[in-house]
Amino acid sequence: MMKFLVRRLVHTLIVLFGISLIVFFCIRLTGDPAAAMFQGTGQPTKEALDQIRHALGLDKPLWEQYATFIGNMLSGNMGHSFRNNEPVFSLIAERMGATVSLAAGGVAVALLIAFPVGILSAVKRGGLMDMFGRIFSLAGISFPNFWLAIMFILVFAVHLHWLPASGYNGPKYLILPSLSLGLILAGVLARLIRSSMLDVLHQHYIRTAKAKGVAEWAIIIRHALRNALIPTITFLGLQLGALLGGVVILEQVFSWPGVGRLVLDAINDRDYPVVQGSVMFLSFLLMLVNLLVDISYGFIDPRIKLGRGRT
């Protein structure tokens, strides 16, 4: 286990270094922060622009700016926003609760729908339930979540007036964004669960359990589902990146005050420290979750030894 954790830590540091290079140079291709600060106030003079660039440290060589950025990150300092001079960490911390609640709501919706649909579809293979499950999965793969979000807003907020269309002021504001995020993921997840369950249900030990007279529900829950969980959890871990991408889009659609909107606003303002800090923080969070997913294999299936087989 210790060797596994050390190896993953080294991999994490290498990946974070690569991400830091990409985000540092790519954000500088989006435009000049000094010019963005004068947007809408007329044409600034060259002296005024130079003064802003000097104050922000943008007149230094790129390698020196990157070294400062990395040095600050290693010391736990994400820098300060160009726009309001607030610490980047504070800005992320203020928005993180809204983003986590939206992502958790989406995952909860996906799990609550995907497991029953996927399991019943596999157990009742070839029947009406299986047909419904496959159609549901195909719909989940085909529809983008922003389209679904707009449809939900039109139906449940604009026409029926049942739920709020935007904002973040209580549990009912979470329903439409969570459904928009979770239903798409549920379709893909249900398809994977069905496929994993079908593989497991044809194994010899399942037939042996049936021959011994073990109840069908016990075979499904104790034997089949447990062994089908590993590919499902792996998929969920890999999908977190796509999930965060969906969160960013839905936060914009629902005017949700999360980290996704913070990053989009920062890109529009050319607020380099906020973009760099947010991307690095979210990347670290994704890698941490995937590490926890890998560790969970050993608890789900004790035959798996981390660092020897699956890593």
Image: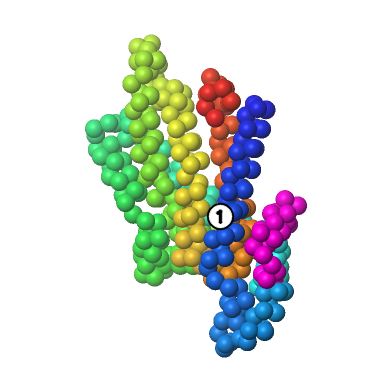
**Seen from this angle, which residue lies furthest bottom?**
42
284 and 183: which is toward the camera: 284
Mark 1 is on which residue type?
Ile
Residue in the image at 40% along x and 56% along y: 145
- Disc 1 packing (10 Å; few <14; some 14–19; many ≥20): few
**Residue 59 falls within the magenta-colored stretch:** yes
Instruction: Give the side of residue 177 with respect to residue 292, left or right.
Output: left
The quarter holding residue 231 reads top left
Residue 47 rendering spot, x and y as whole percentages: 67, 84
Q: Is residue 94 visible?
A: no
Residue 255 rendering spot, x and y as whole percentages: 51, 67
Work out whether 62 lies above or below 291.
Answer: below
Residue 115 rendering spot, x and y as whole percentages: 42, 38
Residue 184 rendering spot, x and y as whole percentages: 39, 50
Q: Of helix, strand and loop, which mostly describes the magenta segment?
A: helix
Instruction: Give the side of residue 3 with respect to residue 103, left or right.
Output: right
Q: Is residue 226 visible?
A: yes
Q: Name the residue beneath numbered marker 1.
A: 22
Work out whether 307 lies above or below 33.
Answer: above
